[in-house]
Amino acid sequence: MSPSIFLNLLCLGIASAVPKADHGLDAQWNQWTATHGKLYNETEEGWRRAVWEKNVKMIELHNQEYSQGKHSFTMAMNAFGDMTSEEFRQMMNGLQHQKHRKGKVFQESPFAEIPPSVDWRKKGYVTPVKDQV
């Protein structure tokens, strides 16, 4: 088999593996991509659209079950809607556990005047909530 025929068959197989888009969701998809500034190349858009559609259906099912009293919260689409669960975990759950290092133990001064509570917001140390759309 010639390399060009093999390449064409490979491309055909890849293209047929991407599920067909639900055209009833076209307006919603276009609005979502515009809202979140999503730009894809031709090969990636079909895959991302399929992942997004799967997430839309999962959210709709969950919210329907919520209305039946099966869940205590609702779900909504956000900027991560075109990502699989695994991609989201890899991107957002990057906490690296570090072993506890032994160090000096803090000894409070017996003469220190420590308030019973501190409002860290008033001191400017609390940042706004992020990614809680």
Image: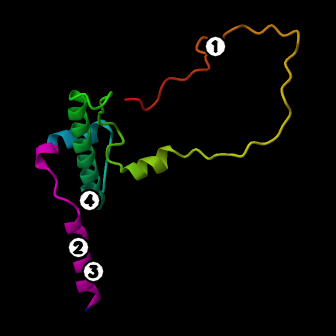
The residue sitting at 16% across, 53% down in the picture is 21
Give the residue at mark 3. 7
Instruction: Confirm whether the magenta stretch covers residue 83.
Output: no
Residue interval drawn in magenta: 2-26
Give the residue at mark 4. 42
Give the residue at mark 2. 13
Residue 119 percent coordinates (x, y): 62, 11
Question: Are the residues at dot 2 and dot 4 in contact (C-beta closer than 8 Å)?
Answer: no
Q: Which mark is residue 55?
A: none
Q: Earlier in the sequence, mark 2 or mark 1?
A: 2
Q: Earlier in the sequence, mark 2 or mark 3?
A: 3
The residue sitting at 42% across, 52% down in the picture is 86
Q: Amino acid at mark 2?
A: Gly
Q: Amino acid at mark 3?
A: Leu
Between residues 24 and 89, which one lies in front from this camera angle? 89
Looking at this rendering, what residue extends furthest in the left direction?
24
User: In the structure shown, which secondary structural element does the residue marked by tag 3 occupy?
Assistant: helix
The residue sitting at 15% across, 45% down in the picture is 26
Placement of the N terminus among the 4 image quadrants: bottom left
> In this rendering, which labeled residue sits more in front, label 2 or label 4?
2
Q: Amino acid at mark 1?
A: Lys
The residue sitting at 84% across, 18% down in the picture is 108
Q: Earlier in the sequence, mark 3 or mark 1?
A: 3
Residue 62 percent coordinates (x, y): 26, 37
Between residues 71 and 24, which one lies in front from this camera angle? 71
Between residues 108 and 52, which one lies in front from this camera angle? 108
Q: Earlier in the sequence, mark 3 or mark 4?
A: 3
